[in-house]
Amino acid sequence: MIAKLSRWLILILILAVPILSVQAQDSGDRATYLVQAGDSLWSIAQRFRVSVTELAAVNNLENPNQLMVGMELTIPAVEGYSGRLTSLPIAYGENLDWVSRKYRIAPELLIRLNHIITPNELYAGTSLVLPEGQMASAASCFLLPEQLSPLELSILAQANPWQIASQNQLTQTLQLLPGEPYLGLEEVQTATLSDLTCPLMEVTFSPQRLLQGKTAVIRLKGKAGMNLQASFFDRTLPLVEESAGDYVLLVGVHAMAVPGLYPFEVQLVSPENRRALLSQMVSVGKVDYPYDNPLTVDPETIDPAVTEPENELWASYAQAFTPQKYWQGAFVFPSPLSKDYCLTSGDCWSSRFGNRRSYNGGTYDYFHSGLDIVGKEGVEIYAPADGVVVFAGPLTVRGNATMIDHGWGVYSGYYHQKEIYVQAGERVQAGQLIGLVGSTGRSQGPHLHFEIWVNGVQVDPLDWLSQTFP
Ligand SMILES: [Zn+2]
């Protein structure tokens, strides 16, 4: 009888302990925020998802200059919550469920504090409001293998299913979905279950925000030997394991991608064949590419019957993913012009990447897919990096064209050449002479159209000439 009672008592304690108790900290019966150095009324309003006017009114701040470091501001519209609030940016790889588990805050409270309507609002980089002093849990993070239910997990780990549920801010034991991250208990860290350690802790995007026409490097740290496939912009891309447990992916963002939120997903398959899914919204920002003056060209040169099959053929060469990486360091300049001079002066281009274009009075549906490097007929063209030629030959629009595969989904292309000195299948090295500048195909004078493809999309080649990827 006593044993039975104490068992109940333990269960009640287990259930009671992880429930978050939000303490008011000398701030009375209201939600507050302590002004920090660098804050402005505008930035605070942004972070707490309230309007500047409302924030100023509630705090009797007639003049924004009245804001002082250390001042305790009332944060309006957080009903029924009292205590100090703070905010932190959502990292790549994190979502509402994960933040809730990591900081042990009930999802309902997070939803209320952040005025969240849909979970997709919490994309990487947005700020998340949470109670001040809420420390990230030190417990290990695991992904629930797709083949296991939470109940099966509990049985395998010989743990109480409620214990796992309460530690993960779940109101029901079956709320955890396969592939979702959960905080593991010491008892759960058995050899059979810990093979999918949570990769959500370390996902990095560089640059931090994706931009139209730019190359992004996505890195993921996790267990060695996993098979990772990313789904992004309707493409499926493999991640390469650069060194044990370090995975990398290069992503090209389309120059005409509509700014906004896009789903980013990574499928994980562990060496033990357990599967999990990482899913998050990420934002793509606008780049102010210039609008070229409307162009008038021979209608035949923009006739889809002519251009489409060639575009498709050309793009098809840039779609394949070669697991081997041929290039090392920054790309060398594909022309005898001085790279330093060209990059600093900008004098060497007759047209840059991304310029919006309109043909024969049509809408601005076109963009310039490469960098036009000035040059007289017969000027030498060099391979910018090691690779394998995948196409070399004459085309209607592109003229004499060459495409080189540099591995990992990266390709470079050359249009309008007078002469081509390489052929498909040939290995080339950085700095090797591959052709001569000309004006073949749809061209209004001798120049080299130089382009870079990253995983099926043309990106700004200047980035590849001025910095080292990944
Ligand atoms: Zn061009």
Image: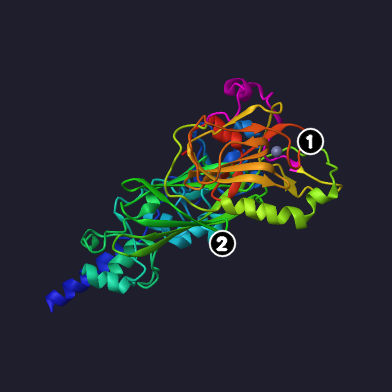
Q: Quadrant of residue 41?
A: top right
Residue highlighted by disc 1: 444
What stretch of residues is rendered in magenta? 332-356
- Residue type, mark 1 in image: Gln
Answer left or right for 276 relative to 310: left
Q: Position of residue 231 (x, y in %)?
A: 50, 58
Whichever of labels 1 and 2 marks the residue nearer the N terminus, that label is 2
Q: State the image coordinates of residue 391 (x, y, percent, origin top left).
A: 58, 47
Foreground disc of the pair 1, 2: 1
Q: Is mark 1 within 8 Å of ligand 1?
A: no
Q: Quadrant of the N terminus?
A: bottom left
Q: Is residue 346 magenta?
A: yes
Q: How far apart are the two marked residues, 1 and 2, measured between alpha carbons?
A: 51 Å
Check the image and name the residue furthest to the left: 2
What colouring does the structure picture have?
A: rainbow
| Residue 331 located left or right of residue 402 | left
Residue with the mark numbered 2: 118
Secondary structure type for disc 2: loop
Instruction: Depth check: give the residue in front, 348 or 403.
Output: 403
**Quarter of the rendering containing residue 39:** top right
Q: Nearer the viewer, residue 234 or 42?
A: 234
Residue 419 image-quadrant placement: top right
What residue is drawn where x is 70% and y is 32%?
Answer: 447
Q: Is residue 408 left or right of residue 15?
A: right
Question: How many numbered circles does the render carry?
Answer: 2
Is residue 466 at least partly visible in the picture? Answer: yes
